[in-house]
Image (cartoon, rainbow, N blue to C red):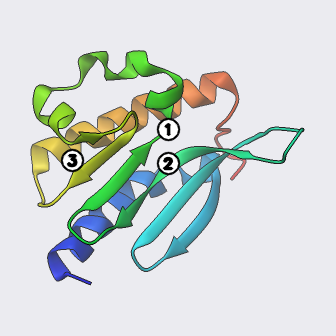
């Protein structure tokens, strides 16, 4: 595991962990952290995913599922963060960029607030 990627992973993991008490930690292992919600589809038992962070070969990938469900959350992101997007809800990082990571933290907070209002995240029910 690249030490720069490990430090970047730990930083982004902490951004997700802030919201863990309101959700369900699905995976917490070296290089991979996934946070789910309390919303489970009755027909197949699928748990709505809040997101997660993983170390990949060439970058650290952060998935932000609230932006997939509520794309209007992306309307205020900067062009620099938008450049990091891969697909509809994934952001890839190669270096520690304080401004972009602060913006990611704010996006996660907005997404958590939206999922809380939807009932998928439940503060104090982790």
Kind of element beneath mark 1: loop
Please state the horizontal and vertical placement of residue 39, each as a whole percent of the image.
Answer: 74, 38
Number of the label disc, if any, that sits on residue 51: 2
The numbered mark, 2 or 3, whose residue comes first in the sequence reads 2
Do the residues under discs 1 and 3 have CB atoms within 8 angstroms? no
Residue at 25%, 18% in the rendered image:
76
Which of the 4 image quadrants contains residue 64? Answer: top left
Q: Residues within 10 Å of mark 2 (few under 14, many from 20)?
A: many
Disc 1 designates what residue? 65
**How far is the residue under mark 1 from the one under mark 2?**
5 Å
Mark nearer the viewer, 2 or 3: 2
- Quarter of the image for residue 69 reads top right
- SS for dot 2: strand
Q: Nearer the viewer, residue 64 or 118?
A: 64
Q: Residue at x 53, y 72 (%)?
A: 28
> Could you give the CA–CA distance between mark 1 and mark 3, rounded to whole angstroms?
17 Å
Residue 102 picture location, percent across and down? 21, 42
Residue 70 % position (x, y): 49, 21
Mark 3 highlights which residue? 101
In the image shown, does 82 or 86 lie closer to the viewer? 86
Q: Check contact, mark 1 vs mark 2: CB within 8 A.
A: yes
Q: Is residue 55 left or right of residue 59?
A: right
């Amino acid at each position: 595991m690249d030490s720069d990627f490990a430090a970047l992973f730990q930083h982004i993991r902490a951004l997700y962990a802030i919201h863990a008490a309101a959700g369900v930690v699905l995976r917490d292992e070296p290089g991979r952290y996934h946070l789910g919600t309390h919303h489970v589809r009755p027909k197949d038992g699928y748990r709505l995913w809040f997101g997660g962070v993983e170390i990949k070969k060439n970058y650290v990938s952060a998935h932000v599922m609230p932006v997939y469900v509520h794309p209007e959350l992306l309307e205020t992101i900067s062009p620099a963060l938008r450049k990091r997007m891969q697909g509809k809800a994934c952001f890839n990082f190669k270096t520690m960029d304080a401004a972009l990571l602060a913006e990611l933290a704010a996006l996660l907070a907005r997404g958590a607030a939206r999922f809380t209002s939807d009932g998928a995240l439940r503060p104090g029910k982790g």
